[in-house]
Image (cartoon, helix red, strand yellow):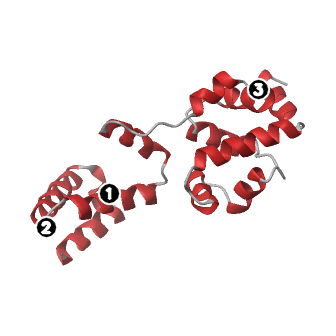
Amino acid sequence: MNKLEKLFFEALMEHESQERLSRLIKQLRGEQSQRAFAKTLGVSYAAVRSWEECETMPGIKSLQKIATYSKQSVENLLNYLKYGDIENQSKLDTQKPKVAEDVLAELNYLPEKETSRLLEILIQKYLSKEESAKLAKMLINKLAQTSESDSTKARVFLLTDQKN
């Protein structure tokens, strides 16, 4: 058994680890509902609820998702859960984005469907009809240049653009 596996199993056995996980999940989800946070992580609502209520601990795949979302390694997350290392906890404190690149970095943690929805919202909110049309034409040209121009996504995009 390697060091990571040992930490994992030790953390599973302790109620204090469950309490730390509960606090961490609540902190990470912030204002999001448990359902929304579960969708963001790609786990079930029941899983998030049971973690917050100290009923169960996540499996290794879910721990990896939590670690990725909290921008740390699985090993650091397990150390925090087992030992309550304050140093690791301070890394988890989320800060509001200060520049556009900070927001873009967060897109890596959104499911593809939510990323698309975010782009739609931004286009509708911040671009005029003329700017939206210009952006659509630019995207159509970009799609035409890629080998994926025959893909379903490209055809759907083209059909949608022609309707507008």
Q: Nearer the viewer, mark 2 or mark 3?
A: 2
Residue 61 visible (yes or no): no
Q: Tell whether 143 sits left or right of 20.
A: left
Label 1 to label 2, Cα distance in Å?
15 Å
Q: Nearer the viewer, mark 3 or mark 1?
A: 1
Q: Which residue is mark 2?
A: 129
Residue 115 visible (yes or no): yes
Examine the image and state in which quarter residue 133 appears: bottom left
Q: Tell whether 19 sits left or right of 70.
A: right
Question: Three-letter amino acid code at disc 3?
Answer: Leu
Q: Which residue is mark 3?
A: 4
Label 2 to label 3, Cα distance in Å?
53 Å
SS for callout 3: helix
Residues packed near mark 3 inside 10 Å, few (<14), some (14 to 19) or many (20 plus):
some
Q: Residue at x 69, y 31 (%)?
A: 77
Q: Which mark is residue 57?
A: none
Query: Is 65 above or below relative to 155?
Result: above
Question: Three-letter amino acid code at disc 1?
Answer: Leu
Q: Nearer the viewer, residue 88 or 31?
A: 31
Whole-percent x, y for residue 119 in the image: 32, 57
Question: Three-letter amino acid code at disc 2?
Answer: Lys
Q: Residue at x 20, y 78 (%)?
A: 163
* First in sequence: mark 2 vs mark 3: 3
Whole-percent x, y for residue 94 in the image: 52, 37
SS for callout 2: helix
- The residue most toward the bottom is 163
Whole-percent x, y for residue 19 in the image: 79, 42
* First in sequence: mark 1 vs mark 2: 1
* First in sequence: mark 3 vs mark 1: 3
Label 3 to label 1, Cα distance in Å?
38 Å
